[in-house]
C-alpha cells in the first residue's frame, strides 16, 4: 500500500510505494523520514570533492605539508595516503566501549574526530596525487569522483577514460575535451550527449558520427557542418577556414552552437538499452527508478546517482555507488563487490556493514572508521561473533529510544544517514552546493555549516587580455605564468582567481590544437555542471505537434517545464531523429 509522509527536513510530502517497503524489509531498516531530495542532499554533504586545502600531516613523527579536503581548522586527524594505508598504525586502537547512556551519533562524531582520516580519498593511484574520491587513476591530475582513468585532467565523474581534459559525467572516451554526457568517443571537443563519435567539434545528441561540426541529432554521418552534408574536401576546407586554433573563433562558434542546440529536438531522457527505467543518462538498466548517471548494468534500483557497473537491489545510493554490488542503502562512494551495506561513505569490498567510513575488505561492522580486513567491530572495538550479534540489536533499539537531536530539532534514530552537523564539511565545500546550490542564509537556516571564502592574493603575471589567441603563439614560458581567471571571484563558482598550466596540460592543448583556457578549473567545472539538467524529474507531455494534433504521450523528464528545450517522447523522437 502506498503511504504519504511529510519530510522532517523540508516539510514537503513524499510517497513510499509497496516495493519500497519490501526493499526496506529486506535491508531490515525502517522507512525513511526525509524525502528523496533531502536524503540526496544529506548524502552529498559528506563528500567534498574539489575544495582542497593545505595542512600538515598529523602522524607521529610526521609534519609534512599535504593537500587535503579538510581545512586546517577542522577538528579531525589527517594522514597522508602513504601513512594512512601503511601498517604503522592500528585503527582498532581507537576503539571505544559503546555507551548506552548517550546517543549513537554523538559517540560516532567523537570517533570521527579521533581516528586518522586520509587526506584525499584516492585508492590504487599511480602518479595521481591530486585526484580525490577516485580509484585506479594513473598519470592524472585534479580529477574527482572517477574510476579507471589514465592521463586525465580537470575532470569529474569520468569512467574508463584516457588522455582527456575538462570532462564531466562521461564514459569510455579518449583524447576528448570539454565534453558532458559523452561516451565511447575519440577526439571529440565541446560536445554534449553524444556517443561513438570521433574527430568532431560541437556535437549534441549525435551517434556514430565522424568529422562533423556543429551538428545535432545526427546518426551515422560524416563530413557534416551544422547538419549540412559536405564532400570530404569541402568539409576540411571549411573547417580550415574556421581557424579553430583561435580562442575568438571558438567562442564565436560556441555562441552559434548554443542557439542551435537549444533549438534541437531533445529526447525526454538519455536512456539506452534499458527496460522499465526512469531518470537520465542511463545505459543497460532494468527496473530502475529516478536514477541518474548510471552505466554498464543497474537492476532493481531507486534514487541512485553516479555509478552502476552491475549493481543490483540498491536504494538511495551515490554519488559513487556499485561495481558488482548489491543490497545497498544510503551509501556514498561504496561498493566494489560489496553487499548488505547501509549508511556508509567510502566502503569497498565489504559485507554486512552499518554506519561506517573508510572501511575496506571487512564484514560485520557497526559504527566504525578506517578499518581494513576486520570483522565484528563496534566503534572500532573488536568483539567475538557472539558478542557482536548480541550487542548490535541492543544498539539499534537504543538508537530509537535515545535518538540524536540536532540544533534544529531534527531527530535521528536508527535508519537515518549521518546528521549534517556531525560531518566535517560545510555545505558549500561539498558537492551538495554543486547540485543543490543554496545561499549562505538558506544553508544556515537549514542548520548547515558555511565556509567563508578565503581571500586570495595571487601575484598574477598573465592577464586574460594578454593571453595569446592561438596555441601556436604560446611557448613553454607559459608554464611559469600565474594566469588571471576571467571571473576574478566575481561569481558563485568557487573561483580561485588565478591558475597555472602544467606540462601535460600544455602538451594536450598542442596535440589537439586548442587555445588555453581563460577560466580556472573551478569556474570551468561549474560551467559544465550547469549544462546538465538537475537530478530531478518532472511529469510532462510530449511537445510534438502535427496537423493531426498534439502527441498525447507523457513521461518523466529532468527538463523542467519552464526550460526552453523542445522535449519529445521516445516514439516522436525516434520518428524525427533515427
Image (tube, rainbow, N blue to C red):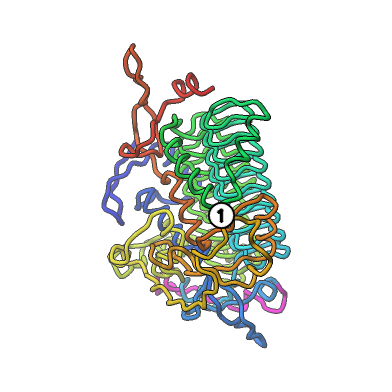
At 70% from the left edge and 73% from the top edge, which residue is drawn?
82
Residue 105 lies within the magenta run: yes
> Can you give x and y, in whole percent of width and height, for residue 261 in the image?
45, 36
Q: Nearer the viewer, residue 147 or 225?
A: 225
Position in image of residue 420 (x %, y %): 40, 65
When the figure is inspected, residue 359 is found, relative to residue 53, above or below; the finding is above
Residue 283 visible in the picture: yes
Left or right: 78, with 89 as reference point = left
Above or below, 54 against 558 in this view is: below
Tell me: residue 545, above or below residue 118: above
Residue at x 59%, y 71% (from the top left corner) = 481
Between residue 258 and residue 373, name the one nearer to us: 258
Q: Write down the residue under mark 1.
A: 156
Most common SS among magenta residues: loop
Which picture quadrant has residue 116? bottom right
Q: Secondary structure at mark 1?
A: strand
Residues in magenta, as a range: 86-107
Which residue: 68% across, 53% down?
149
Q: Residue furthest top?
A: 548
Of the pair 148 and 118, the residue shown nearer to us? 148
- Residue 518, image x, y percentages: 52, 60
Judge by depth and name the residue closer to the eye, 416 or 182. 182
Q: Is residue 159 magenta?
A: no
Amino acid at each position: 500500500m502506498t503511504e504519504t509522509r511529510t519530510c522532517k527536513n523540508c516539510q514537503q510530502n513524499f510517497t513510499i510505494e509497496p516495493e519500497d517497503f519490501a526493499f526496506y524489509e529486506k535491508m531490515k531498516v525502517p522507512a525513511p523520514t526525509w524525502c528523496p531530495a533531502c536524503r540526496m542532499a544529506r548524502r552529498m554533504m559528506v563528500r567534498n570533492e574539489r575544495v582542497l586545502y593545505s595542512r600538515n600531516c598529523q602522524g607521529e613523527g610526521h609534519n609534512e605539508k599535504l593537500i587535503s579536503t579538510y581545512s586546517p581548522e577542522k577538528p579531525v586527524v589527517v594522514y597522508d595516503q602513504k601513512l594512512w594505508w601503511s601498517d604503522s598504525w592500528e585503527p582498532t586502537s581507537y576503539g571505544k566501549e559503546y555507551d548506552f547512556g548517550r546517543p549513537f551519533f554523538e559517540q560516532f562524531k567523537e570517533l570521527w574526530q579521533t581516528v586518522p582520516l586520509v587526506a584525499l580519498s584516492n585508492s590504487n593511484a599511480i602518479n595521481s596525487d591530486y585526484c580525490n574520491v577516485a580509484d585506479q587513476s594513473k598519470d592524472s591530475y585534479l580529477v574527482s569522483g572517477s574510476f579507471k582513468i589514465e592521463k586525465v585532467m580537470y575532470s569529474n565523474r569520468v569512467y574508463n577514460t584516457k588522455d582527456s581534459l575538462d570532462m564531466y559525467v562521461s564514459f569510455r572516451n579518449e583524447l576528448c575535451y570539454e565534453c558532458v554526457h559523452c561516451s565511447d568517443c575519440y577526439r571529440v571537443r565541446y560536445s554534449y550527449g553524444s556517443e561513438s563519435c570521433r574527430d568532431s567539434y560541437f556535437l549534441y545528441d549525435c551517434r556514430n558520427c565522424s568529422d562533423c561540426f556543429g551538428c545535432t541529432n545526427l546518426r551515422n554521418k560524416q563530413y557534416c557542418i551544422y547538419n549540412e552534408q559536405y564532400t570530404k574536401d569541402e568539409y576540411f576546407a571549411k573547417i580550415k577556414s574556421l581557424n579553430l586554433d583561435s580562442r575568438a573563433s571558438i567562442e564565436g562558434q560556441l555562441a552559434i552552437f548554443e542557439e542551435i542546440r537549444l533549438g534541437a529536438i531533445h529526447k525526454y531522457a538519455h536512456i539506452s538499452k534499458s527496460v522499465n527505467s526512469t531518470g537520465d543518462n542511463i545505459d543497460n538498466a532494468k527496473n530502475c527508478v529516478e536514477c541518474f548517471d548510471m552505466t554498464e548494468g543497474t537492476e532493481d534500483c531507486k534514487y541512485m546517482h553516479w555509478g552502476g557497473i552491475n549493481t543490483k537491489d540498491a536504494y538511495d545510493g551515490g554519488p559513487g555507488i556499485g561495481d558488482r554490488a548489491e543490497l545497498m542503502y544510503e551509501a556514498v562512494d561504496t561498493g566494489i563487490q560489496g553487499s548488505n551495506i547501509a549508511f556508509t561513505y567510502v566502503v569497498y569490498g565489504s559485507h554486512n556493514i552499518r554506519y561506517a567510513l573508510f572501511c575496506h575488505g571487512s564484514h560485520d561492522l557497526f559504527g566504525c572508521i578506517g578499518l581494513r580486513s576486520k570483522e565484528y567491530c563496534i566503534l572500532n572495538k573488536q568483539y567475538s561473533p557472539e558478542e557482536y550479534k548480541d550487542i548490535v540489536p541492543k544498539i539499534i533499539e537504543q538508537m530509537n529510544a535515545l535518538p540524536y537531536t540536532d540544533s534544529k530539532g531534527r531527530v535521528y534514530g536508527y535508519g537515518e544517514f549521518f546528521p549534517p552537523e556531525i560531518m566535517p564539511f560545510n555545505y558549500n565545500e561539498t558537492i551538495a552546493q554543486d547540485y543543490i546550490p543554496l545561499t549562505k542564509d538558506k544553508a544556515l537556516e537549514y542548520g548547515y555549516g558555511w565556509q567563508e571564502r578565503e581571500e586570495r592574493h595571487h601575484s598574477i603575471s598573465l592577464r586574460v587580455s594578454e593571453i595569446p589567441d592561438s596555441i601556436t603563439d604560446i611557448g613553454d614560458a607559459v608554464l611559469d605564468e600565474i594566469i588571471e581567471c576571467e571571473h576574478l571571484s566575481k561569481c558563485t563558482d568557487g573561483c580561485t582567481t588565478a591558475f597555472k598550466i602544467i606540462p601535460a596540460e600544455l602538451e594536450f592543448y598542442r596535440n589537439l590544437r586548442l587555445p588555453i583556457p581563460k577560466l580556472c578549473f573551478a569556474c570551468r567545472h561549474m560551467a559544465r555542471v550547469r549544462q546538465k539538467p538537475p537530478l530531478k524529474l518532472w511529469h510532462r507531455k510530449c511537445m510534438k505537434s502535427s496537423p493531426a494534433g498534439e502527441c498525447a504521450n507523457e513521461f518523466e523528464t529532468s527538463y523542467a517545464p519552464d526550460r526552453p528545450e523542445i522535449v519529445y517522447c521516445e516514439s516522436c523522437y525516434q520518428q524525427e531523429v533515427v
